[in-house]
Amino acid sequence: MKKFMLFLAIFLFCTVSSHAKEEKVILLISEQNIEGPQRAWWASEIDLSASEAVLANNLISQGYEILEPSSLSKIIEKKPAFRKVSLSADDSVKLGNLSRADYVILGKAVASSGGNVPNSSMRSCFANLSAKLIRVKDGKVVAYLDASGNSAHMDVITGGREALRNAAQDLSIKVIEALKKEGGN
C-alpha cells in the first residue's frame, strides 16, 4: 500500500508539474539608439526593439509566454493613457491586468557613442538598460534590475544596436533569476 501511495504521489506531482501554467510576461522597454528617433518606444510605430527581442527570446527559451505590445493593440486603442513614452508602474499594472499577464517588465534602454577606437575607424558604443519587474496581481515591484553593454563598430547605429543587445542579454539573465526566485518556471 505504501508503494502504491508513493507511486500515486509521484505520478500526481509529475502530472501537475508538466501541466503547470505558463506565466505570461509583457515587455515594455522604451529604447533609444544612437541617432535614432527621439520618441521610439514600445507603443510606437517605429520598431527599435533590439532589447525586447533579446529579452523575449531568452524568456521564451525558459518557458515563459511573452505578450507582445502588438498583440495588445486593442487594449491600447481603448486606453490612450497606455500610449505614452513614460508609462507609470500603476499604468503598466492596469495593462497587465487587462491582458491577463502575470508580470510586466517596464524599462528604458539607451545607447550612446564614445570616441574612436585607437588606430581604427571604429567607434565605441555603450548601452544602459534599467527595468522593474512588476508582479501584476498585487502591483508589487519584485526586482529593480540594470545592465550595460558595449560594442565597437564603424557605424554608430549598428554599434548602438549591438550594445543594446549585449545589455539585454545581461539583463535577461537577471530577469530570469528574479522570476525563478518568485516561484516561476
Image (tube, rainbow, N blue to C red):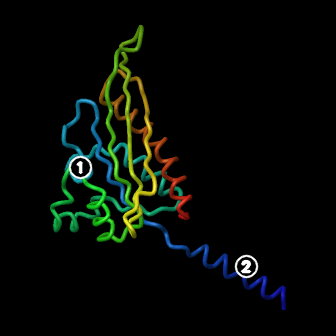
Question: Within 10 angstroms of label 2, few (less than 14), some, or many (20 or more) residues?
Answer: few
Q: Looking at the image, tell me whether mark 2 or mark 1 is earlier in sequence order.
A: 2
The Cα–Cα distance between marks 2 and 1, rounded to whole angstroms, is: 48 Å
Please say if 82 is above or below 46.
below
Please say if 158 is above or below 28.
above
In-image side of 71 versus 78 (left or right)? right
In-image side of 184 versus 147 (left or right)? right
Residue 111 position by quadrant: top left
Q: Which mark is residue 10?
A: 2
Q: Position of residue 11 (x, y in %)?
A: 70, 81
Q: Residue furthest bottom?
A: 1
Choose between 179 and 157: the one closer to the eye.
179
Q: Position of residue 89 (x, y in %)?
A: 31, 57
Question: Within 10 angstroms of label 1, few (less than 14), some, or many (20 or more) residues?
Answer: some
Q: SS of the residue at dot 2?
A: helix
Q: Amino acid at mark 1?
A: Ser
Choose between 158 and 163: the one closer to the eye.
163
The C terminus: image quadrant: bottom right
Q: Residue furthest top?
A: 119
Q: Nearer the viewer, mark 2 or mark 1?
A: 1
Q: Position of residue 91 (x, y in %)?
A: 26, 61
Please say if 108 is above or below 12.
above
Please say if 35 is above or below 54.
above
In-image side of 43 versus 183 (left or right)? left
Q: Amino acid at mark 2?
A: Ile
Q: SS of the residue at dot 1?
A: loop
Q: Residue at x 25, y 54 (%)?
A: 87
Give the residue number, with chain letter if any, for mark 1: 86
The N terminus: image quadrant: bottom right
Q: Position of residue 175 (x, y in %)?
A: 48, 51
Q: Residue at x 36, y 43 (%)?
A: 50
Choose between 92 and 52: the one closer to the eye.
92
